[in-house]
Image: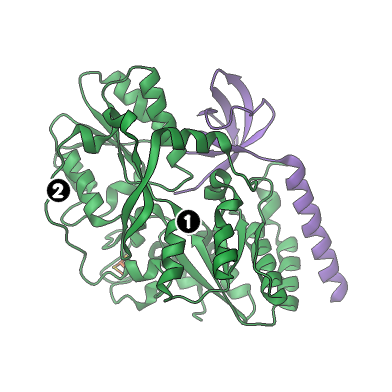
Amino acid sequence: MKFASEFRQGKLAQGLLSKIRGASKRPARFMEFCGGHTVTIFRYGIRQALPETIMMLSGPGCPICVTANADLDKAIALARIPGLIIATFGDAIRVPGSYTSLQVARAEGADVRIVYSTLDALRIAEENPGRKVVFLGIGFETTAPTIAASVLQAKEDGLANYSVLSLHKLCPPVIKALLDSGEVALDGFICPGHVSAITGSKAWEFIARDYGISCVVAGFEPLDVLQSVDMLVAQVERGEPMVEIAYRRGVQPEGNTEALRLMDEVFEPCSAEWRGMGTIPDSGLRLKDDYRRFDAEKVFEIDPGPTREPSGCICGEILQGLKTPHDCPLFGEACTPEEPVGPCMVSSEGSCSTYYRYGGGGIER
Amino acid sequence: MCVAVPALVKSIEGSLARVEIGGIVREVSLRLTPEARVGDYVIVHTGYAINVLDQAEGEETLRLFEEIARMADGER
Ligand code: SF4
């Protein structure tokens, strides 16, 4: 078993699809929370292959997309501090903030370096003892433990020039906010597989218990997604919402306890601003006071100035499943992956970029 | 951004491992998965193994899919 191509076999996909077609009687609305699932669904034409009874919506699970302009502006303001090195994952540099992007700041002389891992950022800090290195911490629970690990590593190695701008977001609070807003009606969630590898499937129990919405954790291969739809359909038909795992090779109910321990050692929850959704309590992570010397917000004076939203961009509503990219007048015209207006077109997992690359997923329903 | 890929652990030194991802060997941190052993498949996200993949569960899931495909064939 290589844990990859086995889960893409067309013959097995047909089997799952015919099971879903046979079982799905009631109309059901499912949201795939994660942008990675949106990509799988579009790449393999899953929306079109599903029966008419099932409607799929895309959710807010794209960390770059949900990062507020005010936070991007902070990162850009940091990059403009002379001598400072910004280390970041690639997606973040092309996202426009209020006035400019990290990419433009870099063209204007800022030292912005794309890294694959916090391990690379630590290496840059080691190699540049006379300069400060700030890692842009953008991501969900999947990524946050890797950043926590880097802070602990920096502490152990006595690296005094490494810090983190923590813009991390937590998934359960945003799902709660989405459901509390009452604007989007759902029967089921495809829960994020790699967030769940860390948090465990137990993180979603409140959704089934308090909101009566079915939840299935899915992996990112097409068969994983089809299995999750099959399990959601079965729950909906039985009328028994619960949390199940369609990705048992990668996710346990209790999650990765070591990763959770490291996260909890370094970070604590704080309120955070989400694009289009405003401030959500306890939905972000900041460094604990013990680690303040690794907290870029404490180490540097950051003054990004006033925030401005890109005019005409409806990313905020798309992220909540209220609109689709086709509802945006800029989609594919003024806004393309080459010249993105909003973050949903920049990130490879943003809905707008996925719709653009895969031709809107065919039939609109 | 939560993209993560399966990788085979080839060797371990301290908290670092050499893993193979689609024929390419990379160094990843095992800090989040100290239980990982040589020969395990791990899920790698941004240079860290975030979980050890469960071989038996993977095989069980595939068996289930094959069963479902057989039943679908029988109905046709
Ligand atoms: S198409 Fe562009 S402008 Fe429109 S919502 Fe998407 S990212 Fe924003």
Expressed as whole percent of the image width and height from the top left, the position of residue A182 reads 43, 75
Q: Chain of mark 2?
A: A
Figure quadrant, ligand 1 = bottom left
Side of A57 relative to B8 (left or right): left
**Observer able to see residue A117:** no
- Disc sitting over residue A172 in the figure: 1
Instruction: Name the residue rendered at 69%, 28% in the picture.
Output: B39
Q: Find residue A317 and report its image quarter.
A: bottom left
A106 sits to left or right of B57:
left
A230, A11: nearer the viewer: A230
Residue A13 higher or lower than A110, as above or below: below
Where is residue A97? Give x, y as percent.
22, 54
Residue labelled with disc 2: A304
Query: In the shown orientation, is residue A15 left or right of residue A126?
Result: right
The chain coloured green carries which letter? Answer: A
Colour given to chain B in the rendered image = purple
- How packed mark 2 is, by other alpha carbons closer than 10 Å (few <14, some 14-19, many 20 or more), is some
Q: Residue at x 40, y 47 (%)?
A: A139
Vertical comparison of A57 with B18: above or below: below
Q: How is the image coloured?
A: by chain
Residue A289 visible within the image:
yes
Residue B72, located in which quarter of the rendered image? Answer: bottom right
Which amino acid, mark 1?
A: Pro
Residue found 20% across the figure and 69% down from its top: A311
Ligand 1 within 8 angstroms of badge 1 C-beta: no
| Position in image of residue A362 (x %, y %) | 51, 75
Subunit of label 1: A
**Do callouts 1 and 2 mark residues in contact (Cβ within 8 Å)?**
no
- Is A345 or A271 nearer to us in this picture? A271
Near-viewer residue (A110 or B55):
B55
Residue shown at 60% from the left, 21% from the top: B12
